[in-house]
Amino acid sequence: MPSSERFDVAISDLSVRYPDRESDALVGFSETIAEGEVVAVAGPSGCGKTTLCRTLAGFVPSMIPATVSGDVCLGGDSIRGVPAEALATRVGLVQQDPDAQICTLSAWQEVAFGPENLCLPAAEVRARVEQGLAELGIAHLRDRVTTTLSGGEKQRLAIASILAMNPHVLLFDEPTANLDPRGVRALFATLSDLVSTESRTLVIIEHRIDALRALAPRLVLLDRGRAVERYPARERIDYAEVGLRGAWALAPAGTTTGSPRVTVDRISFGYADPLWKGVSFTLREGEVLVVIGPNGGGKTSLLRLLAGLAVPREGTIDRAPGTRTGFVFQHPHHQIFERTVRREMELEVPRGEGGVDAELRDARLAGLEDVAPLSLSLGEQRRLTVATALARRPNLLLLDEPFIGQDRRNVLWMISRLREVVAAGGTSVLVTHDIPLAAALADRVLYLDRGVQLLGPPDEVFGRLRDLGENAFTPEAWS
C-alpha cells in the first residue's frame, strides 16, 4: 500500500433505494470523515445506518441491488460502483450479523481466509491470524468449528477476520451487540491503538453510545435516511433526550412469591466439555430473571433447556402444567420462515381477525407487511420475532439478546410488553450484555461462567462480582 495514499472519506448527496421499498433508505446524505477520525452513527432502527456502511464498503449496489445516486470518494477518488472485493484491502466492514459473514469451518481458517485470498506469503498469513485471534481474546478457539461458537464468539471472530485484512477504513455495524463486557473492553482497546498509532479511520454504528466513550467519537444522528444532528467529539449528550440508550430509570417489578413456573434441579449441560454443573433454581410467576456472563458461558444453552429444545446431561427441568413458551432466538433469521412479514405474523395470529395489523403497528413494522422478512434490518427482524413470540400469549417468555439493533424507544416497547406478560402472572428469562439495563430490570440476576454460577438479587450478585474482580459485569463500569 503506497504510503502517500489518502484515506479520508467524502460522501456527497448519497441516496439509496431498495427494489422492494417505497422510500429511500438514505436521502441526500453528505458527510466528510477525515483520515484517523472516529465517527459514530446512531439513530432509530431502520433509519439507514446499515445501508450507509454497506454502500461505503461497496456491498451496495454491487452485491445488494439498489438504486444509488450521489458519490462516495476515498482519498479523493470515487468508489461508486467499485465492487466490494476491489475495496477489501482499503475498506473493511464488520457486519451486524456475524452469521452473514463467517464462511469457513474453523476459527483459524476464518481469520486466514482474507489474507490467503490476497495471496500473501504463508508466514504473513500465519502472523496475521495469530495477531487477530490474540487481539480479540479468542486464541483458545483457533480449532473450534465455527457453527459451535456462541453469538459473541462469532462476533469476535468476524472482527478478527476483518482486522487480518489490514484495511485502513474500518466500518463496524453494532460491534458490541453480542460481545460480553470483557470483549467490549478488549475491542475498543485494540481500536484505540489502531487510531492513535496508525491513524485508521473508524465508522461505528451503535445504539449504546456510552460503550464508545473510550474512543471519543464524533456523533452523527440519522432519522429516516437523513442526517438530523451532529455532535463534536467529547461533547456531553443527554442520550435519553436524543433517543439513544443510556441510563435507565426503571425499577424491577419486585420479587414475587407466586407459584413455581419452572423448577430446575441440579442440571448439567455441555457439548464436548461441560459448560456448568449442578445448576438449580425455581422460576416463579411474576418474576424477571436476567442472565449475564461471558461469551460462551452457556446462557443461550440455558434458554434452550428451559424451552425444551435441549436435554440436560444430568438433573431435571419441570414446567408447570399449562406453560406456554414464547422464545426469541439470539439470531432472528433462525426463526423466520415465511416470504412476507404479514405471512410470518399469520403463523401465530389467525387470519381475518385484524390482529396482524395491530401487532405490526405495535412493533413499528407497519408499512412493511409485504416485504420479505430477511430483507429487513436486523433490528426490524428482531422486533418481528418478538411480536410473533408475544402473539402466542406466552406465560414463559424467553428472550435471547432481544435489544440488539434497537433504539431507546423500541427497547422501552419490549420492556413494556415483557412487563405485561409478568403482570398477568407470566415469567420471563432474559439474556443480555446490557448490564445497566439488567440491573434496572431484573428481580434476580444469574451470572453464568464455566465453573461459576451466581444467583440472587441484583445488588447481591453485582457485589459478589466486584469481590471476584469481574468489575466489567457491574453497572458502574458503563456509567
Image: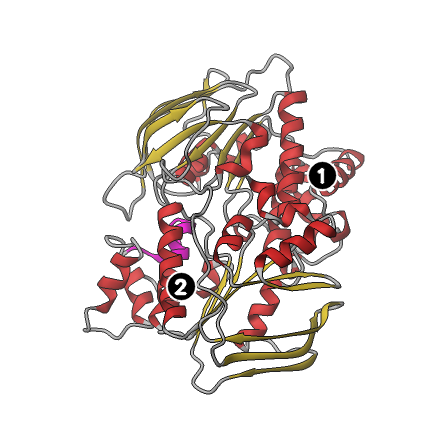
The secondary element bearing badge 2 is classed as helix
**Residue at x 77%, y 51% (from the top left corner):** 140
Please tell me how crowded label 2 is: few (under 14), some (14-19), or many (20+) other residues with Cα within 10 Å: many
The secondary element bearing badge 1 is classed as helix
**Nearer to the camera, 28 or 410:** 410
Q: Say if the magenta span includes residue 419.
A: no
The quadrant of the image that shows the N terminus is top right
| 12 displayed left or right of 235 | left
Q: Where is residue 157 in the image (x, y as percent from the top left)?
A: 65, 47
- The answer to whether residue 165 is visible is no
Q: How many marks?
A: 2
In the image, residue 333 sits, relative to residue 405, either above or below, namely: below
Q: Position of residue 225 (x, y in %)?
A: 31, 35
Q: Nearer the viewer, mark 2 or mark 1?
A: 2
In the image, residue 477 sits, relative to residue 56, either above or below, namely: below
The quadrant of the image that shows the C terminus is top right
Q: Position of residue 278 (x, y in %)?
A: 72, 74
Question: Which image quadrant for residue 190?
Answer: top right
Q: Say if the magenta span includes residue 373.
A: yes
Q: Position of residue 114 (x, y in %)?
A: 64, 39
Residue 174 disc label: none
Please tell me how crowded label 1 is: few (under 14), some (14-19), or many (20+) other residues with Cα within 10 Å: some
Q: Which amino acid does label 1 sit on?
A: Glu
Report, in whole angstroms, how far the alpha carbon at label 2 lies from the one at label 1: 37 Å
Query: What's the magenta region?
Result: 371-383
- Cβ–Cβ below 8 Å for labels 2 and 1? no
| 153 displayed left or right of 444 | right
Which residue carries the number 2 mark? 418
Which residue carries the number 1 mark? 135
**Residue at x 68%, y 77% (from the top left corner):** 267
Q: What residue type is labelled 2?
A: Leu
- Please report whichever mark, 2 or 1, sits nearer to the chain's N-terminal start: 1
